Structures are given as C-alpha cells and as structure tokens.
Image (tube, grey):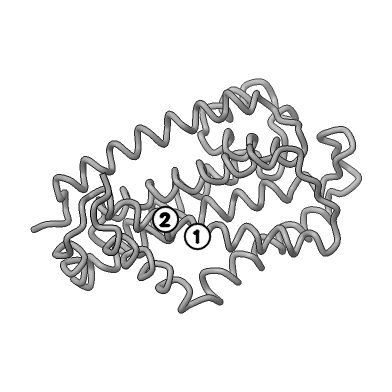
Amino acid sequence: MIQNWLGLWTLFAKEVKRFMVVFMQTVAAPVVSAMLYLFIFSHALAGRIDVYPGVSYPQFLVPGLMMMTIIQNTFANTSSSLIFSKVTGNIVFVLLAPLSHLEFYLGFVGAALVRALIVSIGVYLVALLYLHMDVASPVLLLLFGLLGGMLLATCGLLVGIWADKFDQVATVQNFVILPLTYLSGVFYSIHSLPAAWQTLSRVNPFFYLIDGFRYGFFGHSDVSPWFSAAVMIGANAALCILCLRLLARGYKLRG
C-alpha cells in the first residue's frame, strides 16, 4: 500500500523535471524521428500497399509509430535515470528517503508514462497536419498505450537495476528493444509475411502492443485485441512482480 504520498509525488516530479530539462533531446527529437519515418515510408510506399479497407498506408503507419515512440521512450527514461543515479552515486539519496519499493516503482514508471504521453501526442498532432485520423475505440487506445508504457518502463527499471554501466543499458537498447520494435509490425501487417515469419512475429510481445493499439484507431487488427490485451496484462503482471521483488531485496542497489 502507498503510505508516503508526498514522497511518491516528489520522486515523480523529480523524474518528470529530469527529462523536461532536456526537452529537445527527450521529447522533440523522438517526434521528429517518427515524422521522418512517416514521411519517407509513406512517400515511398503510398499507393503500393493496401492493408485495411479504407485505410491508406500513411494512416496505417501512424499508430505503429506512436507505439514505437512509447516503447523506446519509456524504456529509455527509466533505464537511463536509474543507471545514471547508480554510476554517479546519487541513488543513495533516493534509497535513504522513506519510500517503499512500490512507491519507488510507481515514481519512476509514472514519470516514464508522462514522457510517453507527451511524445505520442506530439506524433499524433503532427500527423494530423496532413492526415485524417479517426479513433474507433478510445478505450482500447488508452489501454494499449498504458500497457505498452508500463511494460517498457518496467523493463527499463529491470535493466537499470541489473546494469553496472551505461554500455550494458545501450546493449539491451540496441540489440533487444530496437530489433523487437522494428520486427513487430510498425511498418507492415504480419499477414503480408510468409507463414513461418507470421508465426515468429507472434512470439514478439511488441507485436501485440502495436496490433492492439492500431485496432484502437481503425477497428481492424491482425489478431483479436482482447487476446493482445490478455497477453500484455500477463506480461506486465509478471515483470511488475519481478521488479518489485528485486527492489524489495535491494538487488544491486544497496551495497
């Protein structure tokens, strides 16, 4: 149970301020990167690929790019903050505060979700400048955005707890998170792949995030959004329990 609401708010506010201080790097840059993907791929492939009835390829790209920014930014926010605190030694000031491991977890994850919300809304607003984007199911859109943000924020915390230096965090980012993101259906529907690759794609947890998030916009998806939601809820629960146990033990954080 949460007992120290003031401490939780203070940690949350500190983490939000940390990424807002470098707004151009943490918010503006991801929006620009996502828009470059949108402009380049839509220009190269518009009119050549039909995915869902009545949905153009540039429209199809937008939800995938929004979820991609959520995935990358929530992971980066928690992992970079924790490893920086460990390397510089100022993690001790957070650990000395009267915060439970649940409050520690919620403070970091909550701030990561705020960053993801700002960046994803930025991508959506820029896309609206030249695309018409209806929302078929706002509830599912919010659900999958929240599940995706929590999943990757928790993954970032786990990597930050485990890692002893920045190189280890960068290795996970470059060789695990990025490949899984690009192979999750951001730029294509898995039904356009051979059967073997479709089966492989279904093993990728990020696929269910992007597919469910896309359903929130168009009411179309490659698998049932309810199945995707169940998979993501289970994955979130498992990683959350693991993270809370490690925090409770002080694994690689206390001495």
Looking at the image, which residue is at 66% across and 68% down? Answer: 32
Crowdedness near tag 1: few (<14), some (14–19) or many (≥20) residues, C-alpha within 10 Å: some
Q: How many marks?
A: 2
Q: What is the residue that sits farthest to the left in this orientation? A: 255
Amino acid type indicated by mark 1? Val
Q: Foreground residue, 197 or 80? A: 80
Q: Amino acid at mark 2?
A: Gly
**Mark sitting on residue 169:** none
Q: Which residue is mark 2?
A: 110
- Left or right: where 39 falls relative to 31: right
- Which quarter of the figure is the C terminus placed in? bottom left
* Residue 182, x across and y down, in percent: 59, 46
Which percent across, then down, holds residue 62? 73, 51
Quarter occupied by residue 181: top right
- Which quadrant, please, contains the N terminus? top left
Q: Secondary structure at mark 2?
A: helix
Left or right position of 76 against 31: left
Residue at left 23%, top 68%? 87
Q: Which residue corresponds to the image point at 45% horizontal and 46% vertical from the top-left? A: 150
Residue closer to the observer: 35 or 21: 21
Contact (Cβ within 8 Å) of mark 2 with mark 1: yes
Q: Residues within 10 Å of mark 2 (few under 14, many from 20)?
A: many
**SS state under label 1:** helix
Q: Is residue 244 above or below residue 173?
A: above
Image quadrant assignment for residue 9:
bottom left
Q: Is residue 150 left or right of residue 131?
A: left
Query: Is 173 rendered above or below residue 208?
Result: below
- Residue depicted at 57% across the width and 40% down the height: 143
Where does label 1 land, which residue?
Answer: 114
Relative image position of residue 37 (x, y in whole percent): 71, 58
Q: CA distance from mark 2 to mark 1?
A: 6 Å
